[in-house]
Image: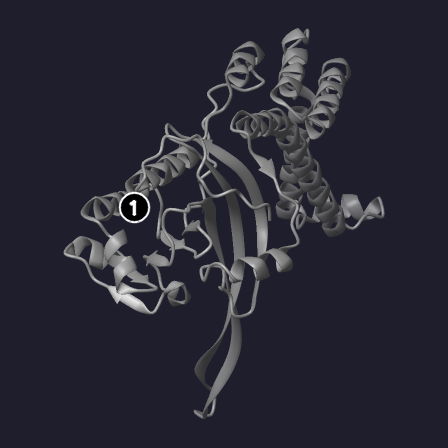
Amino acid sequence: MPNASQNARLTELLTVSEASIDRAESNADLLNVIHEFALYNGPLEFDRTRAWWCFGTGLLLLASAVALYWIGNIHSVALFFYRLEIDPDSFGMGTGFLGIVIAVWSLAWMKSKSDRLPSLSKRIARLSSYFHNGLTFLREDSAATLKELDTEFGDYRRGDYSRKLVESIQGEFTGTLRNLPFTYRQLHYVNRREVHTTVTDEKGNTKTETRVVYDHYDRYSLVIDFPWVTGISVRSDYQSQNDYSHPMDTASTDFNKAFRLTGRSEMLCAKFIKPSTVLHLLKLFDILHRPNLEFSDSGELCLSFESNDLFAFGAQYSLASPNNFYEEISAGIELPRLMSALQWSHALSELHDDNFTFTATPPKQRQEK
């Protein structure tokens, strides 16, 4: 079907490169793969000439089947097929089905081939963003980790039917005053509810039917070493399990509408919610959707939210332009949304570090989970 020489060579390059990306452990490994595309002698796209011919053939067979359906009732035409011992209706249906199969298969082939290069480019850019920003994936037992997190934070106690950790990524943010170790997690949880509906039968009798509905949600979070504040919760959603026993309103109407502030004591709340902190917390809505903050007694901040694009990146080039893509990956792919959230967190630490010590790391030693 395709041009054997061009398509076979490009398929081999993609297959080898995909396997290399699966084993990649550094940005240098990614650059080696891109270098092979830069050296490739030939067009970096599949020849679709024969695929288009097959697609056209499929449409022609389908059109023939439709035409046969309309003229099949003509006596002379029907007689011709019957003399050949062929049922014209069955012949037309078979021809049409064959045409559909050929046309769909041709389109599917072209779609699968056209997706391979962009897909590999996105994988390379995604991995580059991890390597460049020092991120590593954690292998965790979801149930055990959630049980441990439950002792620290109320935000993870979601889902009355089920919950699980989908993804966990670890890193460290390098700020101007200190480094902030953090762990990003995606929580998927399911709520179960019953829906009651009243139905009426053909005789006018009514009855109530009950069906079970499962609502699926995702919640995302950054757990950051933050020893400067403890025993405080600031939430913007319904998760009341975050709350401490002492609520407090502020002098800011905007803040009181946006957040619910609670703490282990009124003194802790008053110490935390300085005017500068009020303004800084309100800025968080420019970065994250429906944010919550929990400062645990052990000196960690759980910053949770509904935004699912924290690891979004914008790569300008792809493997279709290997030389430009090489330069872009060599420079490293940035994660502006993640950095904005971490810079905001670093600025919050500056507001609450009473000692304002210019140290590279916070005084609390990080505990490995």
Q: Which residue is mark 1?
A: 285
Pick the residue in front: 191 or 70. 191
Q: Quadrant of residue 108?
A: top right
- Residue 273 screen position, x and y as percent: 24, 52
Give the residue type at disc 1: Phe
Q: Is residue 210 above or below residue 259?
A: below
Pick the residue in front: 312 or 349. 349
For this view, does 254 lie left or right of residue 100?
Answer: left
Q: Is residue 248 above or below residue 327?
A: below
Q: Residue at x 58, y 62 (%)?
A: 147
Q: Is residue 248 above or below residue 284?
A: below
- Residue 340 screen position, x and y as percent: 37, 35
Pick the residue in front: 324 or 349. 349
Q: Quadrant of residue 59?
A: top right
Colour approach in the figure: one colour
Report if residue 260 is visible in the image: no
- Residue 188 screen position, x and y as percent: 54, 56
- Residue 179 screen position, x and y as percent: 45, 33
